[in-house]
Amino acid sequence: MIATSVTLLVVVAIFSLGGVAGTNAGFETLVTRSSGLLLGGLSALAALTLVRVTRSPMLPVALTLLLGVGVVVIGYMLASDAGDGTAEVIGVPVSIIAASAMSGSFAVTGIAFSTIRYREPLGSLGFVRTVGLKPYFFAAGIWLIGLSVLVVWVQMLMWLEVDLLLPPETARGAIEQAGGNIVITVLLVGVAGPIAEEIFFRGFVLTGLLKRFGVRRSLLLSSLIFGLFHLDSGAIVPTFALGLALGWVYLKTGSIWPAMFAHGLHNTVAVLIARYATAA
């Protein structure tokens, strides 16, 4: 829970302080200068204080925070207007750069807490070699089952007209942030994001919970944390279900690689559908 709280605070700090930099540079962001400074500053202070009080690895967390904010700030300083108010650097929107920095914090926190605070080998995060393609076929099959459940869930919500719980169009939003660039979107959403999130939620959180709560409760709790991290009422249930599927893949294969593959497959398919189904 400490690592989860620290990661959330770091993400909020990068998002808020980065938004302030964008506002100062004359671009439209989701935060104002005053609220961004207050929220970002308090989040950064809370993260570092929590690390200090719990004697957690300070250097990796502090460097992640400083590097994340620094990359976004420099991005906005070097950015030019794409013509529609979007800030971009060499054709890459700064929002994509910021999202990459926030995703990276998941991996850094998971690795730092596991290897430094708890003195676990890197293999404890699931970096275990797999043999053959069977684990990946299994991962794809579990993903299809989970996807079927999500389709039924969405159809039920539409039938009941419960719009509040409908999943957000995250993939389409990512494509828009990337200026329609499908390659950049897939690299971020389908590759970088799944790698970082699997290291943290399955490799670190699920593995850590197993030692205290057993398989069933650990799988449920880690999936719930995964869902709540997405901070959207419509995303909680779908990501919870996805977390169950990915957690099961991780537990059955004993490796993080098949879970990363299934997560990447899920996100990439969502991006491709959002891009080409809309175009059709």
Image: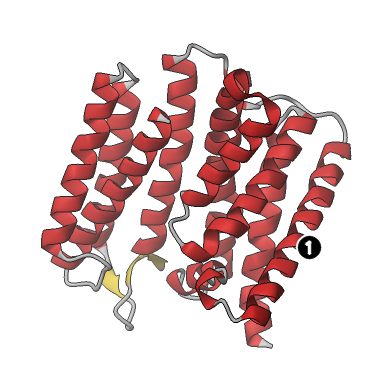
Question: At x 14% / y 53%, what residue is drawn?
Answer: 37
SS at badge 1: helix
Residue 266 as seen in the image, left or right of residue 199? right
Quarter occupied by the N terminus: top left
Total labels drawn: 1
Residue 42 as seen in the image, left or right of residue 275? left
Residues 26 and 156: in front is 156
Residue 215 as seen in the image, left or right of residue 170? right
Amino acid tagged 1: Ser
Based on the displayed image, in which of its 4 quarters is residue 224 positioned? top right
Q: Is residue 100 visible?
A: yes
Considering every residue shown, the one lying at the far bottom of the view is 280
In the picture of the structure, the residue carrying the numbered disc 1 is: 148
User: As displayed, is residue 92 above or below residue 44?
Assistant: below
Considering every residue shown, the one lying at the far top of the view is 119
User: As displayed, is residue 90 above or below residue 225?
Assistant: below
Residues 247 and 96: in front is 247
Quarter occupied by the C terminus: bottom right
**Crowd band around label 1 with a 10 angstrom C-alpha radius: few (<14), some (14–19), many (20+):** few
User: As displayed, is residue 66 above or below residue 237?
Assistant: above
Q: Is residue 184 visible?
A: no
Residue 241 spot, x, y in % from top left: 66, 52
Residues 212 and 112: in front is 212
Residue 51 spot, x, y in % from top left: 29, 25
